[in-house]
Image (spheres, rainbow, N blue to C red):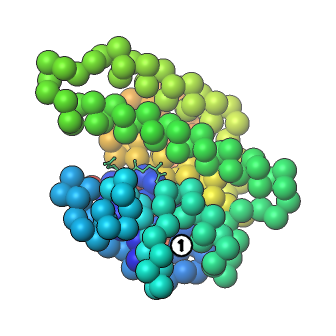
Amino acid sequence: MKILYSPPSPYSAKVRMAAKFAGIDAEGVPTDTIAAPANLIDNNPLGKIPTLITDEGQAVYDSRAIMQFLDRTGAKRLYPRNAAKRTEAEVLEALCDGICDCLLAIMYEHRFRPEEKVHQGWIDKQWTKVERGLDHLEANLPRSTKALNGGHLALAALTGYLALRFPGKWERGRPKLKRWSAKFAASFPDLETLRPRQ
Ligand SMILES: N[C@@H](CCC(=O)N[C@@H](CS)C(=O)NCC(=O)O)C(=O)O
């Protein structure tokens, strides 16, 4: 099994941590989406990472479909069996991924638009969503990281991405979120190596 990814990508970090946690042997294939290589485009018309390719050649994307696939495939489950708890984990994942969507929209606005066309109003709108989302997380953090699930892994990916791309911009007033991130790093050193990095 292969996972096309890039080291800073938060969604890639989430699924690679999930594969490792679930005991699935997946080879990480560093992939430059801007270059749009054939092994990416031929497997995912959207040209996005992460894209998982099974040993049989089936492509699975996006990251949430990959998480569900890994949950069905691995030795360890990624989502609670209890329906209410599972919904909770899935919503936490959706929130963390959604915050990443806003952060990426901000990054892309700067990266892919000529400077005179960068739309500050759009960036501000995305950042408002980020702030609301992070405040919600600060007030509703999962209690423990002992029994990891897909929601926790999405949160670890999000906080890793914030630390990488937005240092000094998200921590103030959110001590619990910062502590949660540090505790994750200390508790799961093997997963920590897969969090977003340059
Ligand atoms: N909803 C998707 C988002 C994936 C995504 O946007 N990945 C980024 C990298 S972090 C990407 O591939 N960007 C290149 C592009 O949009 O062309 C998922 O959860 O997998």
Position of 71 with respect to 195 (left or right) is: right
Residue 73 visible (yes or no): yes
Check disc 1 and report its element: helix, strand or loop: helix
Amino acid carrying mark 1 in the image: Ala
Q: Residue 93 placed where, x, y %?
A: 61, 48
Side of 6 where 55 appears, left or right: right
Q: Which residue is drawn at 56% across and 25% down?
A: 132
Q: Can residue 13 be seen in this view?
A: no
Vertical order, 15 against 104 (above or below): below
Residue at 68% in and 50% down: 90
Camera-side residue of 104 and 17: 104
Image quarter in which the N terminus is found: bottom left
Q: Where is residue 68 drawn, in percent x and y?
A: 63, 64
x, y percent for residue 157: 48, 52
The residue beneath circle 1 is 19
Rendered position, 51 above or below 87? below
Q: Nearer the viewer, residue 80 or 44?
A: 44
Establish if 130 lies above or below 12: above
Would you identify the image quadrant in which residue 82 lies? bottom right
Quadrant of the snapshot with the C terminus? bottom left
**Residue in the image at 28% along x and 36% along y:** 108
